[in-house]
Image: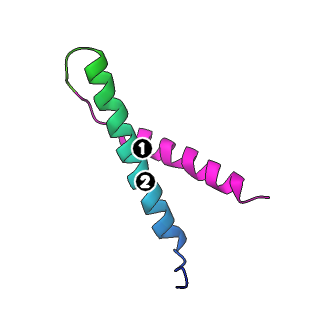
Amino acid sequence: MKPTSKTPYEIRLELLQLAQVVLNEKHKAAGVANGNNQSTFPTTEEIIAEAEKMNGFISKANQH
């Protein structure tokens, strides 16, 4: 099977979705660690920053 290539928009969307999942888990873990079991939610800015960090890692790996 030939792999399908994704557009830059699809890649960005996947990175944003993954960043949101990662940050949701971090926020949930922080609530548990505080003993209050109250989870907060990441801000849009936090999600974008996390996605940019992931994108930087991916882009860096492709520069060989």
- CA distance separating discs 1 and 2: 7 Å
- Residue 56: mark in rendering: none
Please give the residue where the numbered disc 2 appears in the rendered image. Answer: 16
Residue found at x 37% / y 46%? 20
Three-letter amino acid code at disc 1? Ile
Measuring 52% from the left and 80% from the top, which residue is drawn there? Answer: 4
Which of the pair 44/41 is nearer the observer?
41
Expressed as whole percent of the image width and height from the top left, the position of residue 54 reads: 55, 48
The residue lying furthest to the top in this view is 35
Q: Position of residue 57 (x, y in %)?
A: 63, 48
Image: magenta residue range: 39-64
Q: Is residue 62 left or right of residue 22?
A: right
* Label 1–label 2 contact, CB within 8 A: yes
User: Residue 56 colored magenta?
Assistant: yes
Q: Secondary structure at mark 2?
A: helix
- Whether residue 42 appears in this view of the structure is no
Q: Quadrant of the C terminus?
A: bottom right
Which residue is at 52% across, 74% downward?
Answer: 7
Provide the major secondary structure of the magenta segment. helix
Q: Amino acid at mark 2?
A: Leu
Taking the spot 47% from the left edge, 55% from the top edge, the residue there is 15
Res 20 visible: yes
The residue that mark 1 highlights is 47
Residue 6 vertical position relative to residue 24 in the rendered view, above or below: below
Q: x, y percentage for residue 35?
A: 23, 14
**Seen in the image, is 49 located left or right of residue 43?**
right
